[in-house]
Image (cartoon, rainbow, N blue to C red):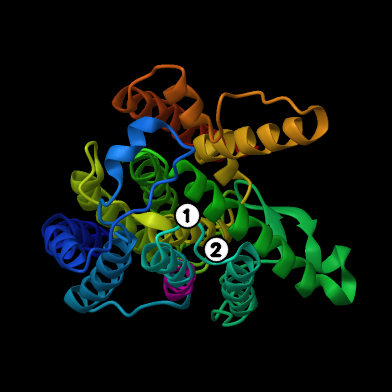
Amino acid sequence: MRTVLIAGAFSLVVTLFGTPLYIRWLVRRSYGQFVRDDGPTSHHTKRGTPTMGGAVIIAAALLAYAAAHLLTGAGPTVSGLLVLFLMTGLGVVGFLDDFLKISKQRSLGLRPRAKLIGQGVVGVVFAILALQFPSSDGITPASTHVSFLRDTRLDLAVVGAVGGTVLFVVWALVITSAVSNGVNLTDGLDGLATGATTMVLAAYVLICTFQSNQNCATLTELEARCYEVRDPRDLAVVAAAVMGACFGFLWWNASPAKIFMGDTGSLALGGALAGLAILSRTQILLVVLGGLFVLITLSVILQVGSFKLTGKRIFRMAPLQHHFELAGWGEVTIVIRFWIVAGLFVSLGLGVWYAEWVTGA
């Protein structure tokens, strides 16, 4: 547990005191946010605000993970390193997107195809490696089973026979792309995505710590409700490191934001959540825990679908948070109310998680 606490505290301090230095560095190089003219007019005042702040979150999480293991003498694990790889890899894709927007002063960074290819390459490498490196008990970081609160009976290796691994890779790509783009769509108001992601990460600190205490590999007597997860304690360390980094960053990202995380941060945080869900065997549970991201993503899908089919829009503007902006809600009001919604979803997810263990259902 010391490793978890050190990781969270270390990353919080790094972003809390390191972000102002990074802001000054970005300002000197005029790396400011480009704001679209067709968005809410209130956003025009944000033009020029330093962006690519996600780089601080990634760096703080990596440093905190390393420091926590060095200070406690515990070695890193394959599961922890894989989640950090997915987070950093998607962060690099986002960084390239942000840098092109800034350097060319336009709303389009990487072309959609190039962005998807970058996300796909990182996701495929993660998925393939996650099925390797079995522990002494034969448990690999990921499983070919589709999981909800734990692995279900739906095994993609059986469904796909020879192509079972391919099916898992595709499934992992769907999860990774959906979550990273969901966080990216949520990142439209000061502090909104950062605060919501922090809540989901906090849930994963609790879940992975509980899995470690109730792990089939460590219990003296095998229990029906134990969890077959490789390295759950180290997954809790990763979740704490990223959560602490988000906490410290939120100090500077809250309204009025002194810095934006950009695609660098939103894609990276989405990757961290997707990696934690896949390796902790809670893939479908993430839909509940990250319910706010789901609602915002659905608002975009419904808006686009409705306009293409009927020529009419359901919302004044998508994603959903901008609809409420155009309806006259203040930015801070929207963020706080959306945080409340995010917290309710996280509470529901944790309740479902714990109820399953208590009842043994």
Give whichever of discs 1 and 2 has the lower sequence position.
1
Residue 139 position (above or below residue 147): below
Where residue 21 appears, x then y in whole percent?
A: 12, 64
Of 318 and 121, which appears nearest the observer?
318
Which residue is the site of mark 2?
279
Is residue 88 found inside the magenta-colored segment of the image? yes
Residue 147 position (above or below residue 117): above
* Residue drawn at 51 percent across, 67 percent down: 217
- Mark nearer the viewer, 1 or 2: 1
- The amino acid type of the residue labelled 1 equals Ser
CA distance for labels 1 and 2: 34 Å
* Residue range highlighted in magenta: 81-90
Which residue is the site of mark 1?
107
Q: Is residue 60 left or right of residue 331?
A: left
Residue 293 position (above or below residue 259): above
Of 38 and 56, which appears nearest the observer?
38
Is residue 230 found inside the magenta-colored segment of the image? no
* Residue drawn at 63 percent across, 66 percent down: 116
Where residue 111 appears, x then y in whole percent?
A: 59, 65
Q: Is residue 341 left or right of residue 153?
A: left
Main secondary structure type of the part rendered in magenta = helix
Question: Which class describes the residues within 10 Å of circle 2: few (<14), some (14-19), or many (20+)?
Answer: many
Question: Which class describes the residues within 10 Å of circle 1: few (<14), some (14-19), or many (20+)?
Answer: some
